[in-house]
Amino acid sequence: DLHDLYRSRSGSSHLCPIYQRSGRSSVALMHRTLLSACAQRPKVVILGTGWSSFRVLSDIDASKFSVSVVSPRNHLLFTPMLASSAVGTVNQRSICQPVRPVCAAKGARFYESQVCAIDKRQRQVTCRTASGKEFNLDYDKLVIGVGHQPNDFGIEGVKEHALFMKETADATVLKRQILAKLEEASYFHALDSDMTLTSKEEEIRRILTFVIVGGGPTGVELAGELTDFLQQEGRQLYRHVIQYAKVHMLTYDLLSMLEKDLQAYACQHLAKRQSVHLTLNALVQKVDKDVLKLKIGEETTTIRYGTLVWCAGVKAHPFVRDLGLKLNKAGSLILVDDRMRVLGEDGIHAIGDCAAIEGIPLPQTAQVANQEAVYLAKFLNEGSPEDAKPFKFKPLGTMAYLGGQTAIMSSLPVVRRITGFFAYVGWRSVYWSMQMSLRNMYMLSTDWTRTLIFGRDLTRFGAASRPE
């Protein structure tokens, strides 16, 4: 009833002054006018809740657009700290920003679904819920920021036997796996009448062999966090088996975006300080359960493992190729111009890891995605002017945590490079400042303090209860 819709702000039963003066029919007219104004706002549909999509949602002027967000994930994940959450240094909730509070503040709609088709003629996207039901959303402006997925390069066995570092659940699974392997090694000697460890050393070594494939920032930071955990909580809580633990890193090169001397610094620190068995020029050829085959130069060898984590690159989601949009030569990324407009399309934009600017090669990093999103939100807010300045990426530096409270920061705006403990402080400070809310800043601060005082969280949740 409109009589109820237009009460005073105090919530009393008295009608607001406008209603009292104008009467019920005038208020009904006002209500229809308001709905009409909302309907006339251009419809913006944002696909994804990654770095780029979330930033567009945060920066877009909701008074000018009717905004809808579609994603199977209801939060932004701060992926640079996924490795920290996998070993309990920080809580996973501390690096996740829920999308619904932002949507509520913007007056936007959120649909926990995935997009399966785009009808460019009708300007509609077809969405599918987790239960398989489909619905359509109209758009005037479409923003595609669906990110990427891990790249297994078609190597046999990777998809079946490796763990990955891309989503929140990946960190949960890896943490559970690490703790499970430590517990398995702890009771392995008691499985028969011989309680000594010497007769079972070979199998315990395999159980506690952790292999990380990939030498980019994700793989390097995972190696640093994992070895920190093994050298601290591992030595304290698993004293009788921790001597058998070993961390391998297999990669063709290490932190290739850095200068050669910084690459050498990282290699030396990982090998000597963190005791990582680093193998360069390595190419994995096949993965089986508990063993992988790799080629080092001209030689072929095998490594028996208990846990394999694949951090060796990313690729586009398959459905990106099925959207009917112009792609790059590799057929994996959506081609856009320097204003984030998809080539040959009207009203469709693509940003982040699923897009490539024609003629401007850029790395697939959160830094690039964030700057593209800031540019696109401003471009849309200003009415998509034809004379808008083209997007220009401003590199803010590269950094990586190496473990042992040591990090690398390179190509910074003010200083050229920082290494060691001061880089570690800078690394944490930058990641803290990049959080999307005061909530996450507070939670991250308390997590670091808790870990410093009490150590990492080793809780491993079991199965849900069920009567027998």
Image (cartoon, rainbow, N blue to C red):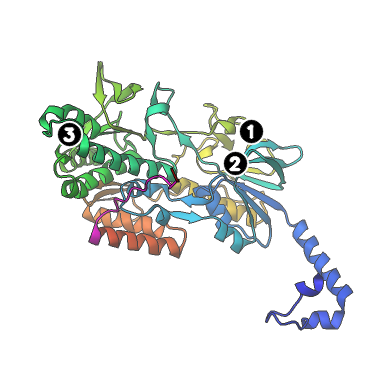
Q: Nearer the viewer, residue 26 or 393?
A: 26
Q: CA distance from mark 3 to mark 2?
A: 44 Å
In the rendered image, residue 450, in percent from the top left (x then y), is placed at 29, 61
Q: Main secondary structure of the magenta part?
A: loop
Give the left or right position of residue 260, taking residue 355 as reference: left
Whichever of callouts 3 and 2 sits on the residue coming sooner in the sequence is: 2
Q: CA distance from mark 1 to mark 3?
A: 55 Å
Residue at 21% across / 49% down in the picture? 233
Nearer the viewer's eye, disc 1 or disc 3? 3
Is residue 429 visible in the rendered image? The answer is yes
Q: Label 3's element?
A: helix
In the rendered image, residue 68, in percent from the top left (x then y), is placed at 65, 52
Q: Label 1's element?
A: loop
Q: Nearer the viewer, residue 449 or 296?
A: 449
Q: Label 2's element?
A: loop
Q: Amino acid at mark 1?
A: Leu
Q: Amino acid at mark 3?
A: His
The image quadrant that residue 83 belongs to is: top left
- The tag on residue 189 is 3
- The tag on residue 130 is 2
